[in-house]
Amino acid sequence: MKKIALALLSSGLLFAANANALEHHTALALEHSASSAAHGVDGHAPQALEHAKEALKHAKASEKEHAEAHKHTTEAVKHLKVAIEHAEKGHAKVSAEHTNTAIEHLRNSIGK
């Protein structure tokens, strides 16, 4: 039981750390967007342009990361549903195989 609790705790910590990494580009896109808007209001077109370009770069990276994460999460959901179906029929080993595949997809969704 201690091993299971430890595994769940460490998985949760890894998830939290990687979820923050996923948001990194979003945060940078917001930061550069705000700087671009502020420079625009002040009439500083070159600085507004520079920050808008950086914001776009990070927004595109964030969009790509989130799309990849969504794809893996969707696959994990499919495998967990199949795992439940097999567990309900008493097929423990087949259920475990699908659950392990779901775990792989969930880890991939957070970059691990």
Image (cartoon, grey):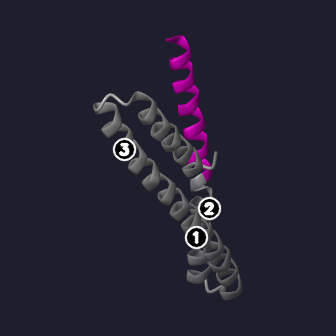
For disc 1, the marked residue is 59
Nearest the viewer among 56 and 93 is: 93
Q: Amino acid at mark 2?
A: His
- Badge 3, how many Cα within 10 Å: few under 14, some, many 20+? some
Q: Secondary structure at mark 3?
A: helix
In the rendered image, which residue does mark 2 sit on?
25
What is the number of the mark on residue 72?
A: none
Q: Please state if 90 lies on the left or on the right of 40 as rendered.
A: left
Q: Give the prevailing secondary structure in the magenta stretch.
A: helix
Residue 93 highlighted magenta (yes or no): no
Residue carrying label 3 = 82
Q: Is residue 83 left or right of residue 28?
A: left
Q: Magenta stretch: give its range.
A: 1-21
* 87 over 53 or under it: above or below: above
Q: CA distance from mark 3 to mark 2?
A: 34 Å
Spot occupied by residue 74 in the image (x, y as percentages of width and height): 43, 55
Nearest the viewer among 41 and 5 is: 5
Q: Position of residue 57 (x, y in %)?
A: 65, 74
